[in-house]
Amino acid sequence: MFNSDLPLIIRFLWVRIRPGLNKLEVSQSTGYFELQLISVENVNGELADGECCDGPRSPQDRRCTRDECDTYLKVCLKEYQMVVTTTGACTFGAGSTQVLGGNRFSLTTKNNPNKIDDAGKIVIPFQFAWLVSELL
C-alpha cells in the first residue's frame, strides 16, 4: 500500500460527500517530521534563559565556571506563531533525545565524517484531519 519508510513523505486521502448543493471534504494527512542534530557548541555553558547550567559566572570572562551542561534536544511542533513561545501544547507532536553530551560535541563518526550518529535524531509521526465545506 504506502511505503512509510520514505522520509518526509506526506500521503493524502480525500473523501468527498456531496449532499445537495453543498460539498463537504475531509482531508487526512499522515507522515513524519524528522530532525537530525549534527553538532553543538555552547561556548559559555549557558541554558536557554542565559543562566549557567551549574554554578556561578566567572567575574573575569563572564563564562560559567563549573560542570558542563547536560545537553539534549527537545522539539515541539505547533501551529504558526507571529511571536514564538516555548509554552503551550505541541499541536502536531513532540519528541526529545537522551542527554547527548556537554557544551561541545559532534555526532559525526570519526571514521566517516559524512555518517551521523542516530542518537541525535528525532522522528515525530503525525496524523491529522480537517474538514473543508464549500457551498456550490
Image (spheres, helix red, strand yellow):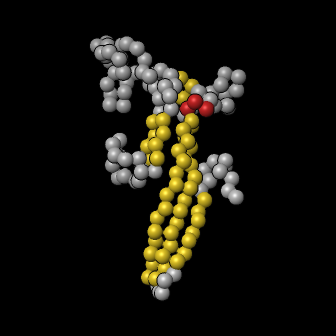
Q: Is residue 8 above or below residue 110?
A: below
Picture coordinates of residue 133 (x, y %)? 44, 75
Residue 57 in view in this figure: yes
The residue lying at 45 percent from left, 78 percent from top is 134
Above or below 57: residue 84: below
Q: Find residue 120 and report its horizontal and vertical position in percent.
A: 55, 32
* Residue shown at 52% from the left, 66% from the top: 27
Query: Which residue is at the far bottom?
Result: 20
94 or 52: which is nearer to us? 94
Between 20 and 36, which is closer to the camera in this rendering? 20
Would residue 40 be visible to someone looking at this image?
no
Relative to 65, residue 46 above or below: below
Query: Foreground: 7 or 18?
Result: 18
Nearer-the-camera pick, 65 or 133: 133
Residue 64 placement: quadrant? top left
Name the quadrant containing residue 80: bottom left
Please say if 104 is above or below 130: above
Q: Residue at x 58, y 65 (%)?
A: 13
- How many numbered markers are drawn? 0
How far across and down, in percent of the image, does residue 112 sit? Answer: 70, 26
User: Residue at coordinates 65% horizontally, 25% vertically from top-left?
Assistant: 109
Q: From the top left corner, tell me how far across and down residue 2 is, in percent.
A: 67, 56
Q: Quadrant of the N terminus?
A: bottom right
